[in-house]
Amino acid sequence: MNYNQLFENIKKKKSFLCVGLDTDLDKIPQFLLETEDPIFEFNKQIIDSTHKYTIAYKPNTAFYESYGIQGWQALAKTIDYIKTNYPDVFVISDAKRGDIGNTSKMYAKAFFENLNSDAITVAPYMGEDSVTPFLSYENKWVILLGLTSNKGAFDFQFHKENEEELFKKVIRISKTWSNKNQMMYVIGATKAEMLKEIREIVPEHFLLVPGVGAQGGSLSEVAKNGMNKSCGLIVNSSRGIIYADNSKDYANIAGEKAKEIQEEMAELLDKYL
């Protein structure tokens, strides 16, 4: 999926919502544990109920890898289900990989060829050669960690050198490795006030923004400070949607929660685009 296709889908659905599939067997409705593949069954029903309101899904791979081969198989089935039934929806593997070039090449093969993800989150700490292997795939995206929403972000990301914070230096340098058609940045919603400054560095790139909802980020502030002429935002909500209900009606409630966010997004798109 390319930049223009992503923007067209945002306009068509009047949404820039990403539903995070952080599927935890301790949190899903317990009746699902009786099914053959509880993780996939939970995801399938969430996807079927929310796909009309979202332009992306983001499975966090740690929630699948923690269950071993069964979890990895459930992840593969989930991505395949999205690709087969809702091919207009963008799939982000939230894996936060980042290693030397040969290792990154294998990570890229795993997520882009074998799992057929559209995008993968990558940690840029090891520099350009650790990111380049991911950029060799046409119509696949690298989403670099730019500014995160956790409190530990202040340990390193805001360290200043020559009056420039480290996170700004990472974004400024890394944007030369590719372009807006293949690279995005993770920017935490709880740092929404920083989006204006980030937009001065990357005015046209898409930003993946987690932290809206359960983590306390403001959707309106994110849109006000971060939206560009192509929207330029993919805003993730996980727990506030997928764990909104724990009964047999959980999927319908998730759909209702996604619809509520989509309706707010539609108003923000009308306001700022």
Image (spheres, grey):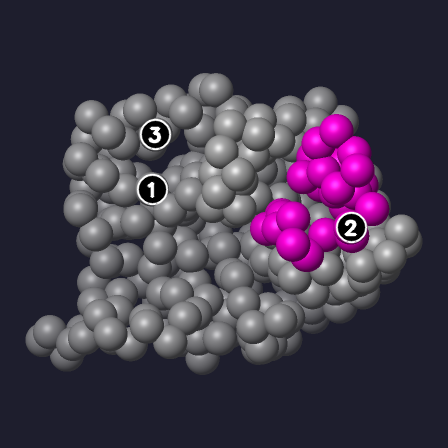
- Label 3 belongs to which residue? 107
For label 2, count other residues whose C-alpha is less than 10 Å away and answer few (under 14), some (14-19) or many (20+). Answer: few
- Label 1 belongs to which residue? 97
79 or 249, nearer to the observer: 249
Contact between labelled residues 1 and 3, with CB atoms less than 8 Å apart: yes
Contact between labelled residues 1 and 2, with CB atoms less than 8 Å apart: no
115 or 184, nearer to the observer: 115
Horizontal side, residue 218 vs residue 249: left or right: left
Q: Residue at x 36, y 28 (%)?
A: 108
Q: Position of residue 226 (x, y in %)?
A: 50, 67
> Which quarter of the picture shows residue 193?
bottom left
- The residue type indicated by label 1 comes to Arg
Separation of disc 2 and disc 3 at Cα?
A: 33 Å
| SS state under label 1 | strand
240 or 205, nearer to the observer: 240
Query: Residue extending furthest left?
Result: 162
Query: Quick one: quadrant of the C terminus?
Result: bottom right
Horizontal side, residue 117 vs residue 128: left or right: right
Q: Position of residue 52 (x, y in %)?
A: 80, 45
Q: Position of residue 225 (x, y in %)?
A: 51, 74
| SS state under label 3 | helix
> Is-magenta flag for residue 36?
yes
For label 1, count other residues whose C-alpha is less than 10 Å away and answer few (under 14), some (14-19) or many (20+). Answer: some
Q: Which mark is residue 30?
A: 2
> Is-magenta flag for residue 56?
no
> Which quarter of the picture shows residue 100?
top left
Separation of disc 3 and disc 1 at Cα?
A: 7 Å
Query: Residue extending furthest front?
Result: 34
Question: In the rendered structure, which segment of residues is drawn in magenta?
Answer: 21-46
